[in-house]
Amino acid sequence: MISVVAPVHNEGAGVERFVARLADVLAGAGLAYELVLVDDGSTDDSWNFVVAQAALDPRVRGLQLSRNFGKEAAVLAGLEHAAGDAVVVIDSDLQHPPEIIPEMVRRWRQGAHVVEAVKRNRTGQGLIGRVGGRAFNKAFTGLTRVDLVDATDFRLLARPALEALLRLPEHSSFFRGTSSWIGFRRSTVEIDIAERVGGRSRWTFGSLFRLAVNGLTSFTSAPLHLVTMVGLGFAAFAVLLGAQTLIRWIGGDSVAGFPTVILLLLVMGTFLLLGLGVIGEYLARIHEEVRGRPRYLVQERAEHSVVPEQWARAKR
């Protein structure tokens, strides 16, 4: 059996469309599956649709988080409650095509432990999403040596890879990065990102920026090293400028340069503030880790009368 994990946030009636299309694809392919829908603190009637689908179909189960913990926490909740031999993570807005899942399962049965869907296009994304996403993935790959170029969260994890992922202790998780970092035998399939079937994207520039900062600070200390290197560069430049000024003064030349000094102060002040911001992000990450709070809290479950063993253990 495979498990399909889909985070849900303010999708409303889109939940019903997603479940119906997924059922058509997987049933048509003859796959035994369960669907774990994780409501990440929706403020609309999404949870009612999840409950209704769980009542109609024993393969559908729902988790309602106590508030909006973010997509990463919702994905983690679904992974920890998945009972399948392989788990597929997919967005519930149908931008990730469910029709690719049978091919992912085929690759898994051929021996792959992680099957990643990579973007062939970015049709369903706005300009900021396309440019920002491509820039972040390339920067992340260059700084961490973890390949995220054109990567998505749409991927299949075999049980060994999933258990390795769930053993990672950090509080601030970044699923796309950690599921690539763990290694294991991998395979990729290309997908076209579709337009949203209903509504509009919940991602804003601010939320995408926070995700990027979380991903980088969770994986690499390169920004801290960059602050150090730029600081050393400024120090070297200051020594050279001081030496030049001293030589000119000894030679009897007038030493002017008030505008230059002001410009240097502005540049250095800007860098100092950015450096403090980078250090602050890492301190905030350390603070989150040492507090040891749960990464998510489950408020309610929606399930059919047949409860898999994994869910029974989770209740205890």
Image (spheres, rainbow, N blue to C red):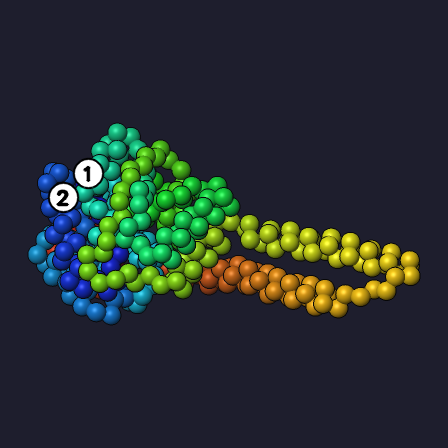
Q: How dense is the environment of label 1, judged by Cα within 10 Å: few (below 14), some, or many (20 and up)?
A: some
Which amino acid, by three-letter code, is at mark 2? Val
Q: Is residue 262 left or right of residue 211?
A: right
Please indicate, yes or no, whether residue 299 appears anywhere in the rendered image: no
Q: Which mark is residue 25?
A: 2
Of residue 90 and residue 290, the one placed in the foreground of this image is 90
Image quadrant where one finds the N terminus: top left
Instruction: Kindly indicate whether the residue at mark 2 contacts the one at mark 1 (C-beta within 8 angstroms).
Output: yes
Marker disc for residue 102: 1
Give the residue furthest to the bottom.
43
Element class at badge 2: helix
Quadrant of residue 100 within the rendered picture: top left
Along the horizontal axis of the image, is 204 left or right of 237?
A: left
Residue pictured at 11% horizontal, 61% vertical: 52
Q: Which mark is residue 156?
A: none
Whether 64 is drawn above or below 152: the answer is below
Q: Position of residue 126 (x, y in %)?
A: 33, 57
Which residue does the image show at 37% across and 35% down from the upper left? 184
Seen at 36% across and 63% down, the residue is: 204
Viewer-nearest residue: 59 or 207: 207
Quarter holding the C terminus is bottom left
The image position of residue 42, as x and y in percent, is 25, 66
